[in-house]
Amino acid sequence: MESYIYPIVIFIVMGVVFGVLLTVLSKVFAVKTDPRTEQITEALPGANCGACGFAGCADYADAIVTKGAPMNACLPGGAGAASEIGKIMGAEVTAAEKKLPVIHCSGDCDAMQQKFTFDGVQTCASAKRFYGGTGACMHGCLGLGDCASVCPEGCITIKNGLAAFCTEQCISCGKCAKVCPNGLIELRSIKKKVDVRCSSKDVGAAAVKACKNSCIACGKCVKICKFGAIEIKDAHAVIDYDKCVSCGMCAKECPRGCIVNLRKPVVKAETI
């Protein structure tokens, strides 16, 4: 009988000793964390979208406290999160400028020629792997809603084969831009009002044949711009938003209508 009791007692004693030892070591070698890190994490929206440039909200909070990261980089959190972070860090913080998504394509089902019907898994990523998608333009919107599926606010819909955004609901997380296999979605400043709605790399007649709304790289927009804010890259117009003043002259000059001006016209009061 004693031959069974002694080993059990030994294991129990060893378990207690090792348990106490591990507890002591955990206290001695514990990594001390700044309480502000947890406070900032709680102040963030928890989207973990990566728009701030970090893996998630907790990593961003740690970077603010330990690495001096910008305190207004959380676009989804906006002014509210920036203000709360400023209070925690004891500094005044100005909210970053809001950004909105724009899709550089206007090739809906009415404009773009279709090559075939895709019967595979109905995602843009899958369609892209199958001969570049169903559209005659391999660089346009694939229209299967990968962007809509990742939008946390449900502000993206597919209308007539083209992604459409409800910008009032958008939190600028940028998840839609990351998931688009053709890289058509870009976040740009809310203050900028002119967008090129084409990313075709086809040239001349090929671009015209593929899509009614395609850019033909004629260069008229480049010539009319007084600020050097637009150029032709990869056979389509590209706007440099740092230089663009949203005057809309390029949109007026575009013979294909693939540059849009969202700026509301100024209404002059009638004189009596």
Image (cartoon, rainbow, N blue to C red):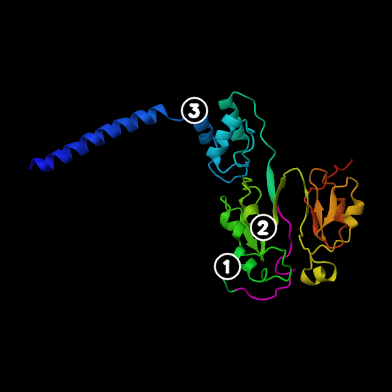
Residue type (three-letter) at the residue carrying disc 1: Gln
Q: Secondary structure at mark 2?
A: strand
Question: In screen coordinates, is 221 left or right of 29?
Answer: right
Quadrant location of the C terminus in the rendered image: top right
Sort mark 3 into few (<14), some (14-19) or many (20+) by Cα contacts within 10 Å: few
Residue 22 lies in quadrant:
top left
- Looking at the image, which residue is at 85% across and 61% down? 217
Mark pair 3, 1: CA separation: 46 Å
Q: Which residue is mark 3?
A: 35
Mark pair 2, 3: CA separation: 42 Å
Residue type (three-letter) at the residue carrying disc 2: Ala
Number of marks in the image?
3
Where are the magenta residues, as a range?
A: 102-118
Disc nearer the start of the sequence (2/1): 1
Residue 164 higher or lower than 271, as above or below: below
Q: Which residue is mark 1?
A: 122
Disc nearer the start of the sequence (3/1): 3
Residue type (three-letter) at the residue carrying disc 3: Pro
How would you classify the magenta stretch by its main secondary structure? Answer: loop
| Observer able to see residue 84 | no
**Residue at the extreme bottom of the image, as rendered:** 116
Q: Position of residue 69 (x, y in %)?
A: 63, 33
Residue 260 higher or lower than 58, as above or below: below
**Residue at the extreme top of the image, as rendered:** 90
Quadrant location of the N terminus in the rendered image: top left
Tell whether label 1 touches label 3 (CB within 8 Å).
no
**Residue at the extreme front of the image, as rendered:** 3
- Looking at the image, which residue is at 68% across and 36% down? 96
Using the image, tell me which numbered label, if any, was put on residue 164: 2
